[in-house]
Image (cartoon, rainbow, N blue to C red):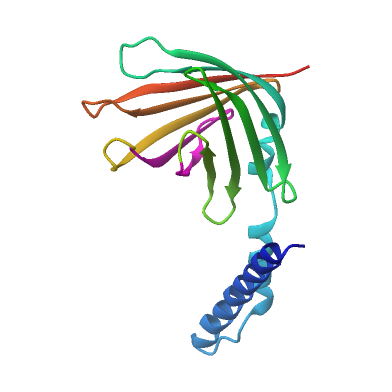
């Protein structure tokens, strides 16, 4: 284990112990209620254990051929490109790691993303980064129906430097096909579709 990994592991362990101590202190501060360390540990175990919400992400795991469309402005024709997405479970089936390789506007494009479900917050959470910028987009949201997840995130415009809200919809058609759509504010402030990526499992 590297020094950085070891340090992060220590930080995580320290944080869990701090939560347990705080829970015990809160119990002790109540009217004659003894600290319940067992209940605190059980709560942390539930928070850390992958469940049914995580299993909904199973269809995303594998190698997929991607067909992407990106609209530069409302009413403009989309830029179309191809790519490959390699997705795998990491950290004990808690997060799906995505590594995307393709092109954008005729140039090589590479991105990395992580998607998981927060048992405490009761939301799906994802983070995305790529070599088209230096920022990270963090999104969160809930399942909408049996086969879709709607999330909202914030990105900073490289033109204005101001934050803008984007909306994403992940739709799983079946075990071999899923689609990611994204909407962002147009110049008039109204949302318009800026991206659509169709993924097909490689055989």
Image spot of residue 54 (x, y percent):
66, 43
Q: Residue at x 60, y 71 (%)?
A: 15
Q: Which residue lies furthest to the bottom in this view?
A: 32
| Quadrant of the snapshot with the N terminus | bottom right
| Quarter assignment of residue 81 | top right
Magenta span includes 105:
no
Query: How many numbered callouts?
Result: 0
Image spot of residue 78 (x, y percent):
42, 13
Q: Which residue lies furthest to the left in this view?
A: 188
Q: Which residue lies furthest to the front in this view?
A: 107
Q: Residue at x 53, y 30 (%)?
A: 145
Magenta span includes 143:
yes
Q: Is residue 50 found left or right of 179 in the rendered image?
A: right
Camera-nearest residue between 190 and 68: 68
Image spot of residue 23 (x, y percent):
56, 77
Camera-nearest residue between 31 and 151: 151
Eyeballing the image, is 147 above or below 127? above
| Quarter assignment of residue 44 | bottom right
Eyeballing the image, is 130 above or below 118? above
Image spot of residue 152 (x, y percent):
42, 39
Q: Is residue 201 found left or right of 170 in the rendered image?
A: right
Camera-nearest residue between 200 and 5: 5
What's the magenta region? 134-157
Magenta highlight: main SS: strand
């Amino acid at each position: 284990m590297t020094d950085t990994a070891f340090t992060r592991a220590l930080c995580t362990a320290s944080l869990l112990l701090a939560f347990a101590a705080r829970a015990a202190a809160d119990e002790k501060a109540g009217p004659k209620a003894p600290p319940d360390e067992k209940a605190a540990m059980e709560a942390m175990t539930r928070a850390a254990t992958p469940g049914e919400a995580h299993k909904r992400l199973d269809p995303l795991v594998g190698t997929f051929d991607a067909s992407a469309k990106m609209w530069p402005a409302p009413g403009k024709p989309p830029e179309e490109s191809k790519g490959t997405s390699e997705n795998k479970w990491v950290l004990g089936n808690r997060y799906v790691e995505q590594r995307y390789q393709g092109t954008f506007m005729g140039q090589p494009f590479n991105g990395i993303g992580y998607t998981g479900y927060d048992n405490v917050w009761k939301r799906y959470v994802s983070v995305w980064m790529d070599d088209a910028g230096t920022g990270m987009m963090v999104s969160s949201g809930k399942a909408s129906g049996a086969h879709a997840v709607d999330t909202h995130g914030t990105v900073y415009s490289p033109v204005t430097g101001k934050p803008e809200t984007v909306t994403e919809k992940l739709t799983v058609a079946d075990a071999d096909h899923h689609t990611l759509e994204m909407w962002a504010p147009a110049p008039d402030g109204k949302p318009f579709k800026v991206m659509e990526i169709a993924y097909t499992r490689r055989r």
